[in-house]
Image: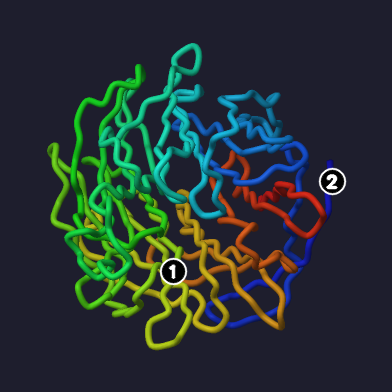
Amino acid sequence: MRLLILLSVFLLVNGCSETADIQLQEIPSVAGNNSSLPSLYTDNTGIVFMSWVEERDNIADLNYATFKNNTWSEPSVISADSTWFLNWADYPSIIGHNGQPMAAHWLNKKPGGTYAYDINISAYTNEWSDKTIPHQDETATEHGFLSMLPASDSTFMAVWLDGRKTAGRDHHEYADLSKAMTLRGAIIDRNGLVLEKFLIDDAVCDCCNTSLAKTENGFIVTYRNRTEDEIRDIYSSVFRDGSWSEPKPVHNDNWEIAACPVNGPAVEVQNGVVATSWFTGANGENKLQLGISNDHGNNFDKVISVDNQNAVGRTDLVITADKIWVSWLSSADGAGQLNLASYSLAGEPLNQYSIPNISGKRSTGFPQITKSEYGILIAFTDVSEESKQIRMFELK
């Protein structure tokens, strides 16, 4: 375990930068050696769940632990195998409800191609159930970048990128959107039974993560879309009264790119406010953007450039009672940096904090943030040493 350390950070007030004696505390990580791919989730009781992968020999373990009263529980193994698809951007996850795990997911390779793999979901009652494959199409194609959230005490919503239409696609057919990646969803119960299935968007970017948030009336998903002109901006769709709305752009960045940037959005809802953050490289400028909606995600009237200088992306976002918190990676002077900025619910800039000397390698993955009892919990994969290790910080 690492010793507690205190880092100096920077405070930005009303857009003006000045040095301040604010402290960000590193806390011991519950993850063991050769650990990576953390995923954080705070349930309706305030308990934090973290899942992560530990690799030993040819076996990968998916573990989880809970964080309560500033203490981690003993880690437990959800599943272990030698046939998983482990990817820096398409990582396993866990959700909880009423203080207990609800479901976890991971990816399992299948014959048919390098990127042929299925989503495996294990639901939890008093133990982890046998795996469920929510897409059920049996094609040897890519299925991943899943997001899920509780829908009720006994069901959860899952959305994912689904490659069934890409089956048999030749490289010269990549521009044919009738053979594009799709965005699909399902409602699943605690026994792993798929109750309902949905096609949300029939042409989306191939490998950018999705993000799902629960609203007062249903759900909202944000993701990277794909048009015939290869504009790959962030879109959203709202689930209400049993169906998903027609997808529409969160903001018209007009980023034209004929390949996937592997850099999806994050979305969160709190007190009627919907916020989403995302990376764009439109017009040759790397930006981290923040959009805010006050009409349940129907329109994002306020869009803020959080970082228009050195943004790398890989963003996450949470909303507390009175603040929007955005995290992202940036690069300056050849070194990486993990940033955490807060905004008022109206979009006014408040504070900004930084953890320097973070590797910008893909193996660093997507840093995670979530609400804890005392502040904001942060997790990321440190690849600065010979073996990977999850590091954790808390901002109180």
List x then y, in percent, for residue 159: 31, 43
Q: Nearer the viewer, residue 293 or 264?
A: 264
Q: Residue at x 49, y 82 (%)?
A: 308
> Which three-letter amino acid code belongs to the residue tagged 1?
Pro
Task: Report x, y in % for residue 82.
Answer: 60, 33
| Element type where label 1 sits in the image | loop
Circle 2 SS class = loop
Q: Which residue is mark 1?
A: 261
Front-most of residues 286 and 28: 286
Residue identifier under label 2: 2
Q: Is residue 167 above or below residue 248?
A: above
In the image, 206: left or right of 3? left
Q: Amino acid at mark 2?
A: Arg
What residue is at 21 percent from the left and 41 percent from the top? 217
Q: Quadrant of the N terminus?
A: top right
Of pointers 1 and 2, the one earlier in the residue sequence: 2
Q: Is residue 359 above or below residue 105?
A: below
